[in-house]
Image (cartoon, rainbow, N blue to C red):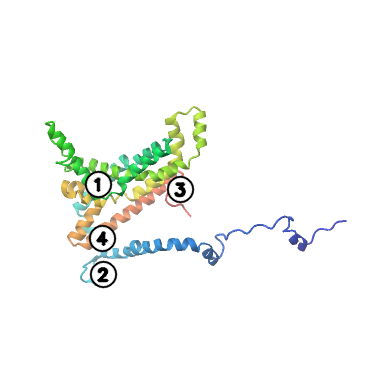
Amino acid sequence: MSTAPTVQEKADRGGPSGGRAPASRPPSRSAPWRTRLRRDRSLLLMTLPLVVLLLVFAYVPILGNVIAFQDYSPFVGIRSSEFVGLENFQRVIADSAFWNAVTNTLIITAFQLVFFFPIPIALAILLNSILSVRIRTVIQSIVYLPHFFSWVVVVSVFYQIFGGAGIVNQFLRGIGAPPWDFVTNPDTFLILITSQIIWKDAGWGIIVFLAALNAIDPGLYEAAAIDGAGKWKRIWHVTLPGMRSVIVLLLILQLGNALSVGFEQLILQRDAVGAGAAEVLDTFVYYTGIQNGDWSYAAAAGLIKGVVSTVLIIAANKVAHLLGEAGVYQKA
């Protein structure tokens, strides 16, 4: 009559089942923090310089927002400046120039959201459909290149083409037609700056979308083709749903940046079209705070902008959750 193996015999055989001993697993989240620190020390060391830069240049300056509640003077400093409470915010809200800047900012953002945001998506889909790797690489290099130009170069190029003495107006004068006022006309300024940002950044914006396209399973396209779906139906039912999470994420970030349209681009052209068309929140803060020396007033306007941007990100992320997407962050 056989007897059951003892505990020691089970251990000698490699555990209760008599098989091989289970392989060691990496420390879980419940492991002591010292163990996780030793495990991830290489990754932490690599991220440490970026964290330091972020703290020094992003989070520490946030403490300077206290001047929005003071009658600040750089000659006496923050400690000696008089505390005035919400007086600066009341001045900002009552200022018509501030609301003109808000209106221009929202109009420019909405226009670019409609006419610029979809272009990188379309370019990524077109590039992904090119079978020749060499041709695709050449096209990518060409469309990426303007991103590395400064706004001074971009604005100068457009002025050389569409300015009063530009190529287009020289041609129009040559054929006896009246010149076309494009770069100094407030009515066409919105189209001008959107055209500039499309030429400069549309090619660079396709990088993330190309990565999202490469992550789509090719078998889905084959299955759709077998079911009789044409090219446009495959794009609509396979490509765009596969890119949806990335599109939603970038759209949330774009909405969070809605009140921060290109400062350098606009300040270079503000004098040409006037503040009525080109004044946005960033240029308003610059001219009010730097040129006029009203630091507290400018800080209050910038703080209002930051609060509204935060609310936009939270609201857009909430909508993403309702649509079943992860968004920028998920609930704990």
Between the residue at mark 4 and the residue at mark 1, the CA separation in whole angstroms equals: 30 Å
Type of the residue with mark 1: Val
| Category of crowding for the residue at label 1, using alpha-carbon neighbours closer than 10 angstroms: few (below 14), some (14–19), many (at least 20) | some
Residue 281 at x, y = what percent? 25, 52
Type of the residue with mark 2: Ile
- Secondary structure at badge 2 equals helix
Q: Which residue is mark 1?
A: 154
Type of the residue with mark 4: Ala
Q: Quadrant of residue 121?
A: top left
Residue 46 at x, y = what percent? 44, 61
The first of marks 3 and 4 along the sequence is: 4
The first of marks 3 and 2 along the sequence is: 2
Between the residue at mark 1 and the residue at mark 3, the CA separation in whole angstroms equals: 36 Å
- Nearest to viewer (mark 1 / mark 3): 1
Q: Are marks 2 and 1 in contact (CB under 8 Å)?
A: no
Q: Which residue is mark 4?
A: 299
Residue 154 at x, y = what percent? 25, 46
Q: Which residue is mark 3?
A: 326
Between the residue at mark 2 and the residue at mark 1, the CA separation in whole angstroms equals: 39 Å
- Secondary structure at badge 4 equals helix
